[in-house]
Amino acid sequence: MSQRRVPTILRLSAALLAALLLAGACSSDEESDDGDATTTAPGGDGEESAGPDVPEECEDPALAAVEERGEPEASVTEQVTGDGPVDIVEGDGEAVGAEGSVTIHYTIFNPANDEVIESSWESGPQDIPLAQVFPAFTESMSGMKVGGRRAFSVPATEVAGDPPPPESGLSADDTVVFVIDLVRVSATGGSPVAADPDALAAAESRGAPEMSVPEGEAETEELVVIDDVEGEGDIVCPGDTVLAHYTGIQASDGEQFDSSWERGEPAEFGLDAVIQGWSEGLVGMKVGGRRTLVIPADQAYGEEAAEGRPGGVLVFTVDMVGVG
């Protein structure tokens, strides 16, 4: 179910690849092994849409502030002396510790020519597990507060290897400047998402869905969202971790490829670590509800089945029983 798109700079360096590989936005041509949720949806009487908007309740003030100030200019590199991180804008939220993960916008500059080596500003904020980042990045982020902008320099060899490959445009004597806008801090080792007792009871009362492909959607090129049952509990926001029962089928032949119902318990997964059709299609859903997603191939696993993954348009029916 998980797929990620890797920023270009990460292809230059094993060190940075290990640091940020999990940070890319969801894509249809690369996968990770997180989770195995897939679901199919019965054609319900619910309302259809081409994909949900982010609910007002999910608006993130820190992200709004970061995006309002926009992508940094190259002139910011002049404030970096190499004596340590420089806070261009002081944040006022939670501080970064030694563990967990951060959600950031970033721009990496080559200060020798002010060129941008890599930036998240076109693809969106990235989730960075601190345990997988090269040490200079983690050290330079320490103590930074949500909502802030921080700049720091790093030897090119730590980012792109020693020596950096020719295609990087960097030499072993160069430094690169990271400009980081911090959107969110997440702890590791948190408690599992608890099931809402009423929502779980309602889902179990409904039982596993009878899967079918909604009429006219077998070859859809857009994400289709059908609320079969409206929930009344907490709302699902981008990046949340959720607990859900689900079933998934291939639209081409109706064949089921996965179901939490057969395993006897709902599955927990983070929306930042799943295919695009899930990370977008479950936003706005409320705990206690049942939703059917019809997901086009480019928001799932691609056109062709491979390595145990289904191909083409997929249909899922999801019963949301918890969010955290």
Image (cartoon, grey):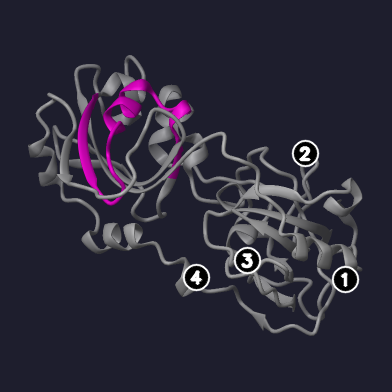
Q: CA distance from mark 2 to mark 4?
A: 33 Å
Q: Which segment did they paint magenta?
A: 127-154
In x, y percent, where is residue 306?
77, 43
Visible residue check, residue 158: yes
84 or 120: which is nearer to us? Answer: 84
**Amino acid bearing label 2:** Glu
Residue 209 in sight here: no
Question: Quick check: 105 above or below 314?
Answer: above
Q: Which residue is mark 2?
A: 307
Residue visible at 25% across and 50% down in the picture: 92
**Nearer the N terminus, badge 3 or badge 2?**
3
Q: Are marks 2 and 4 in contact (CB under 8 Å)?
A: no
Q: Which residue is mark 1?
A: 212
| Secondary element type, mark 1 | loop
Q: Residues within 10 Å of mark 1 (few under 14, many from 20)?
A: many
Please identify, in this view, whether the residue under mark 3 or under mark 1 is nearer the observer: 3
Separation of residues labelled 3 and 1 (CA atoms): 18 Å
Q: Are marks 1 and 4 in contact (CB under 8 Å)?
A: no
Q: How many marks?
A: 4
Q: Spatial distance from mark 1 to mark 2, Cα to Cα?
A: 24 Å
For label 2, the crowd category at 10 Å Cα-Cα, with few meaning under 14, some 14 to 19 and many 20 or more, is: few
Residue type pointed to by label 3 = Gly
Q: Position of residue 248 (x, y in %)?
A: 81, 58
Which amino acid type is shown beneath numbered disc 1?
A: Ser
Among numbered discs 1 and 2, the one appearing first in the sequence: 1
Observer-side mark, 2 or 4, equals 4
